[in-house]
Amino acid sequence: MDFFPVYLKLTDASCLVVGGGKIAERKIDLLRRAGARVTVVSPTLIPALRIAKEEGQITHQAMLFSTDALDGHSLIIAATNEEDINRRVALAAKQRNIPVNVVDRPDLCSFIVPSIVDRSPVIIAISTGGASPILARLLKSRLETLIPATYGRLAALARAFRADVHARFSNARDRRIFWEEILQGPTAELVFARRESEARESLKQALSTVDPTPPPRGEVYLVGAGPGDPDLLTFRALRLMQQADIVLYDRLVAPAIVDLVRRDAERLYVGKKKSDHSVPQPDINQLLVELATSGKRVLRLKGGDPFVFGRGGEEIADLVNAKIPFQVIPGITAASGCAAYAGIPLTHRDFAQSCTFVTGHLKDGAIDLNFKSLAQPDQTVIVYMSLTGLEVICQEMCAHGAPPDLPAALIEQGTTAQQRVIVGTLASLPEQVAAANVQAPTLLIIGKVVTLHDSLGWFRPDTENDAVLLPRPESSGQNMT
Ligand code: SAH
């Protein structure tokens, strides 16, 4: 984080703007909206600022900038088109420890002014740290369309009832649940429809009828977090991530996804790297029961889909026995995510009429799979957890009748910026992978559909190591992207 975001209270604070042109005018307008008393130092003023001066909205010192002008001000903005003056203002302000902004010169600023979405009292500030103000403006316009114009009214309503709600609930958690229901339910809709008096009544009614000491309502959300790219979360997953009191996650869940969980929710890492089960499965099941019984809303966040090689069934079986309410939210499983991002359709009219998901987990060096059936033609076989057993799997496939030149691909860290796709055949893939210093998780796709990667592969993130690891041969049919 290059800049620390804060909101300054400027009511009645005296602020200095150096410059009397158009850009200065925009900054003055913002400062005045925040209640600041603005002094402008500039030999001349544009007409709009002259009027503001005549109407007593600003104080004007008609002179060139001198460092004395800074005295008594708590915030400075330099908005002249004289590089030299802007620099002097920045230097003098920094020497006096007064926050200073130089328009369009982040390097001279001690603070920057973000793009804002103003739904007062709700203010959303957007900054790119000076990297690209245009990008910030584009983001702003997206947010403007997403957030109802009356959102500020909703905040004002909440403020008006804040003390009453505080008095009604003795604990913060019940209060939070009450507010979450109000701010996302029919009361909020009434505000958005500009029926504010009805909204007030509805809130009053809710407050008088709510049970101020509800029995603990623990619940478990078993949520699929998808294969890695946070954009592949479902809306429902994201919503429940905002409601949870505690989140239990394992290694497959990307940090960028864990970051999206409500900030003050407790986070509990429960491991699950191969051969590193930091919390054994029975303990996780038990923990879910205990946390929910104590009244917590527990988010169990799992990589991919919880019901595909995710032991989701086992985790909720214990909840059923303990009569704890739960929801299961599907996620994009690694097979779908990796296939889509590698441009390898799992089925195809010409190449594969069926598709089978299996796990390649080795038990005592062997894999207990029905290779006879997997080696049949015209299908796609997806092998989860296949890195260690890759060689055995490819050998067994061939031993059961699959042609050694059957295309196969290993997708490493699919859907993420680190994604790599190693394409070969049953005969060649184990060696290619051994040479490629591959990092888990990886997914194996076997079948003729793999040949489509060459033409349909679209997601090609820059990875620094590409060239070093495996140069892309021109026409061998074996490649890595
Ligand atoms: N429930 C998960 C699977 C858990 S088993 C799901 O539905 O995807 C763990 C295996 O999933 C890994 O060994 C790997 O084979 C696969 N996997 C998960 N995420 C992956 C990713 N981003 N890229 C490649 N394989 C992945």
Image (spheres, rainbow, N blue to C red):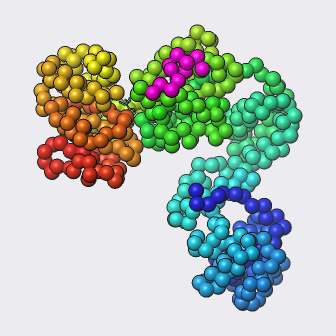
Is residue 138 part of the magenta span, yes or no? no
Q: Where residue 28 sits: x, y (%)?
A: 72, 73
The image quadrant where one finds ligand 1 is top left
Q: Nearer the viewer, residue 153 or 406?
A: 406
Q: Residue at point 34% right, 27% down?
A: 385
**Side of 377 relative to 443 (left or right):** left
Q: Residue at point 40% right, 28% down?
A: 274
Q: Where residue 179 sits: x, y (%)?
A: 74, 35
**Side of 72 relative to 406 (left or right):** right
Query: Which stretch did the figure color magenta?
Result: 276-287
Image quadrant in which you'd find residue 197: top right
Q: Where residue 296 sits: x, y (%)?
A: 67, 25
Q: Is residue 97 visible?
A: yes
**Side of 53 relative to 149 (left or right):** right
Can you say whether 116 is above or below 416 in the image? below
**Side of 177 relative to 424 (left or right):** right
Q: Is residue 382 visible?
A: no
Q: Where residue 69 sits: x, y (%)?
A: 77, 83
Q: Nearer the viewer, residue 337 or 443?
A: 443
Count the numbered circles shown: 0
Is residue 282 part of the magenta span, yes or no? yes
Image quadrant in which you'd find residue 289: top right
Q: Nearer the viewer, residue 211 or 451?
A: 451
Q: Residue at point 35% right, 39% down?
A: 439
Residue at the far top in the pictured view:
321
Looking at the rendering, in which quadrant would you find the N terminus? bottom right
Q: Residue at point 26% right, 42% down?
A: 436
